[in-house]
Image (cartoon, rainbow, N blue to C red):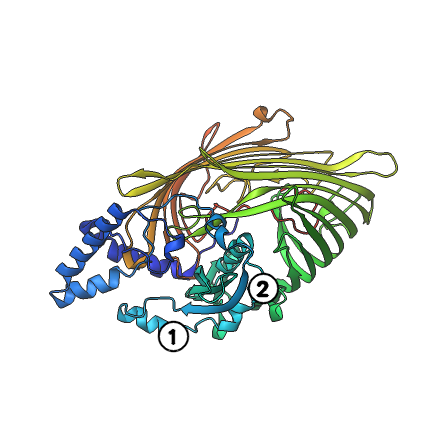
Amino acid sequence: MDPRFRIYVLALTLLFLAAAARVFAAGPVAPPPDRFTPDSARITNHEASERNRRLYDSIESKTSRRAVPRALYNMLFVGSKRDTSASGRVTDEAELLRPYEGKTIGYITIERHQVFDENGSWLERSGNKFHALTRDRVIRRDLLFSSGDPFDPELAVRNKQLLRSRSYIADVDLRVLPDPDDSTRVNLVIVTRDSWTISADGALHSEGRTMVGLYDANIFGTGNRLKVMTNFDRNDFSYGGNMVEYEIPNVLGTFFTANCAAGRDFYNSTLDLRLQKEFLRPTDYEAGVTYSNIKEKIHMIELDSSELVKQRNFDLWGGYSHFFRGIESSLYVTGRYNNRRVSLRPPVSPDLNPAFHDQDVMLFSTGLYREKFYSANMFYGFGVREYLATGYKAELTSGYSWGEFHDGIYLGLSYQAGAFQSIGYIMGNFSLGSYIDPDNGMWRRSAVDVDLRWFSNLLSVRRSRIRQFLSLNYTQGWNRGRGNDESIRFTTSNGLQMLDEYFIGTNRMVLNTETVFFTPYQPLGFRIALFGFADFGLIGYSSNIFRNDFVSTIGVGARLRNERLVFNTVQIQLGVALGKKGLLACDYFDLSNYTRLEQYRYRPTRPEIVPFE
């Protein structure tokens, strides 16, 4: 796996180290109560909040007497204003808005706030001047309702989640104001706070290949994202080509997202065009079309070598869902056509490298789904409000494949469900899929995947918060061919952190556990989380999973995150890898922006083949 890094990580780490000694000497810093969240949706703990306020005021008073301490105070204590002293409670915001259900929506007002406080330090004020505030019309085009519609609490919460998912929005609130002149009407105020959206990017690849880039996720306040990358050889600084990516998240208010990526990176080249819309409402439609022409070097895990592959791919899909109030679920039907042509590839035969065969596939899916959002914090972020989905999805997929060497009937089924329980959040997923030879009825390239995930309620230890994460994945394939994608290995999402050796097979089981400590420290507005992890994996070709190779990794790390900045979490890890015979090759130290934690969704997408990866 190629090592990657973010250029800004180094700068942020240096700033953190410079500030950490001062902050830890002064003790934990608690921000004042949040003024951004309305009273109707705020959960407070008066005693803890008052104690935080007194501590904050005391530090401010003692440092305001001299110029240097005052400058340090202004530099260090510019964190997010959300009070985390009462964090961890899961809230059904739709129930808080239920008294207004069915009333007619009157006027809708948009209140936009800059990234940083207007009365903050000079650094914050300078950042606000340099930042282009998201335009009013950009936020309005993301609304799922309009004046004159009946107010729907579930749709309102879904809309808040949609706005919060935009990379240029750090936080969002929806205030409902009863109309003083008409008891059947309510007026809405949408309050948003922007994220800082300009950043640098970089990557170190093998063979001396190096990439540096710049991007802005909110060009001139339009919500559009532009990223420009240039490539060079770090050994002799020879030029390796440019890449450009552009994204429009909501084209003309249609909720279609348009993406374009084009350019080259040494021997790799990319042309990728996408236009797609997903299900947003319980009764809705989805549609999409993509075209890609890509040449890239792919690692062949069975041969432990890399080969250049060039393929053209055309994808077209669409679907419709309808909500049935009696079962509080949506029935949906989706269809997809995919055309793949490979012009540069490793050797192929009927059972060799089927992932590189020319192929046409027609798939259809039908199923039921339900998705409801709850708000909480300290799951994936470090303090701001987050929206987590609960619900289920039951799906049956069928179709036909016209292959270069084989035709096949495809059958697949899946079930996914998740909910908050007294012991935390529990999610399970089961998928089974296989091609069936139309001539003899034999199953080919079959795969089954079972995924179980859990994370605990938020626990308090003094001023820190602790959450435990646990996941178990089991994947097995049978009647597989030979070559690429016919064996599996430990991957980024289903694997062992920091492992630097390849283990392959057709049968894999992985247990991941991670304990996260959310600390109260906030140097330079960056929240700090410490974590320890232990991963255990079994992989091989034996149908008895416990007779296969055993590998484990253990380690500790830290994460830094500022919720108002667009770049991802900065992560530092230390760890070791162990096998049956002792130490294995691993990245003992890792500095990246990657975090394995992921959001769970129950909304259907285009019909898919059960992955084997």
Q: What's the distance in space between the residues labelled 2 and 1, CA to CA?
A: 35 Å
User: Looking at numbered disc 2 in the image, what kind of residue is underneath it?
Assistant: Phe
Q: Earlier in the sequence, mark 2 or mark 1?
A: 1
Residues tagged 2 and 1 counted as in contact (Cβ below 8 A):
no
Q: Is residue 581 visible?
A: yes
Residue appearing at x 32%, y 52% in the figure: 83
Residue appearing at x 43%, y 68% in the figure: 111
Left or right: 291, with 243 as reference point: right
Q: Nearer the viewer, residue 197 or 284?
A: 284
To which residue does mark 1 refer?
A: 130
To which residue does mark 2 refer?
A: 266
Residue 523 x/y as whole percent: 28, 56
Left or right: 160, with 299 as reference point: left
- Please tell me whether mark 1 sits on a helix, a strand or a loop: helix
Residue 149 x/y as whole percent: 59, 63
- Please tell me whether mark 2 sits on a helix, a strand or a loop: loop
Left or right: 364, with 176 as reference point: right
Residue 253 x/y as whole percent: 60, 68
Q: Is residue 229 visible?
A: no
Q: Nearer the viewer, residue 186 or 8?
A: 186
Q: Nearer the viewer, residue 59 or 289?
A: 59
The correct choice, above or below, for 16 with respect to 548 in the image is below
Residue appearing at x 41%, y 48% in the figure: 377
User: Looking at numbered disc 1 in the image, what kind of residue is underneath it?
Assistant: Phe
Q: Quadrant of residue 480?
A: top right
Residue 481 x/y as whole percent: 73, 38
